[in-house]
Image (tube, rainbow, N blue to C red):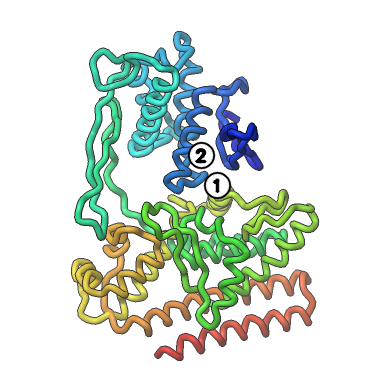
Amino acid sequence: MPVKTFNDFDRWSHLGLDGKLFMVNADGTPFITYRNGVPCYEANMYMLHQLEASRSRRGKGGSLRTYANQIIHLVKFIERQPNIEHFSQLTDSTFRLFVQGLQIERDKFGERVRQNNHVIEIAHRCLNFLIFVQDFHDLHNFIGIDKKNAIRVKVKKYSIAIEGRRKKKEGETVSHSCVPTKDAVKRKLPVSEDDALKVWQFVQNQPNRDKRLRDIALYQCMEQLGGRITELHLITLDDVKKAIQSGNNPYITLTTLKRRDDKLSRSIPIPKTLIRDINQYIKVRKRVLKKLKVNDHGYLFISLTTGRPFQPGSWTVYLNSWKKALGIKGEMHPHLYRHAFITNKLKEIILHHKGITSADKFREHLLHTEKFKMQLQQWTGHTQLYSLDTYINLVFSDLNGYAKTYNAVALKDSVTIVKRQIASFKKQLKEKEITMTEGLLMIESILETFESDIDDALSCN
């Protein structure tokens, strides 16, 4: 494979004055090769450069993988050109040819492989990479804004409004005349209830019990927490223990990605029924690690074959395979569940308010209701409220009391999980995976947690 990922990988940082070699953890660093397996020297040096830069801005391994999967297109392009052996031989015309190739590529059904926005991301990343190549090899007149450069780029200035700041954030981006214009903005529609139900039934009917219990817990977290898929995979056993210890109003703390401020985490209230599903899976997790003789790394979700932390990309692969098996049309990826979570939370709250009959009035309400505004940002992890505009446009109506509505929402979530737990229990009993005694204990546990969630909801009414 042209892009591999290093695991359990340390690399040297520098040689100290005492003669000792200092090592740094470099897990998750992509390693890029040509098709014949020969390493692409410049691309790998660029990855190390980005790794160092990411440490200073709290970057994640997911960004490095994204960068690698973007510049690999340019690496493959160079291999296909009979008269080009090095990146430094690229010109305006050959870079234009590269970008046009990204645009016209089709799949076996004749559909475009990537839309303009995706092409723009790849082109801009490759330009950034070529600037690195110029600096790394100390090249002259290779890439720049002057006519004398082989690749002539243009620098665009931009400014972004940051909530809570008077001044806009200003910056520059390097582009090229061949880079296409952006696609029309698409609405972030959530996963449909019908498609979600099909996937859920698929998950709970998997024949492998260990995989079923793991995927049930992961699916429930994806649906009930509304986190980005990488945020869900960063959940640890300690996070679950804290949720159990948080008392009558349990919550799970998620690491918040895509933030430039100091808010590194957020707390999401959860029904006790979800904790029960997670505990069922934790028993499987403990047995698998013991069987594989793998040291416990602390991450909640693991691969059942290796014991390593379950990779975010694997869940996308699963959903795509299930989509194909179930004959689901349209998009189906983990982030749609995040859209559904945010949309449903807004809908269930807004419908209980009075006097708000439009999206504009609801936004005005947010501006004057600091507690409600902060709660929305806590749930979703968004830095700016305008990020919620798409969801607000989908769901505005009446409103009536924050605490009552909030607990009604939590109770509805609990009912959904209990229904799923009962269905799972019936399946295990039917297939004799559990004894009648174990089944009675499961029912008792389900009812106890559900009763507790009901009490919590009623106590605030």
Q: Quadrant of the C terminus?
A: bottom left
Disc 1 residue type (three-letter): Gly
Q: Is residue 330 left or right of residue 289?
A: left
Q: Quadrant of the N terminus?
A: top right
Q: Residue at x 25, y 22 (%)?
A: 145
Disc assigned to residue 313: 1
Residue position marked by numbered label 2 in the rendering: 65
Which of the 4 quarters of the picture holds residue 448? bottom right
Instruction: State the residue in front, 376 or 14.
Output: 14
Disc 2 residue type (three-letter): Arg
Q: Secondary structure at mark 2?
A: helix
Q: Secondary structure at mark 1?
A: helix
2 and 1 marks in contact (CB < 8 Å): yes
Q: Position of residue 96 (x, y in %)?
A: 33, 21
Q: Residue at x 64, y 39 (%)?
A: 9
Which of the 4 quarters of the picture holds residue 432? bottom right
Instruction: State the residue in front, 431 or 172.
Output: 172
Which of the 4 quarters of the picture holds residue 89? top left
Q: Mark 2 and mark 1: span between their CA atoms?
A: 10 Å
- The answer to whether residue 82 is above or below residue 324 is above
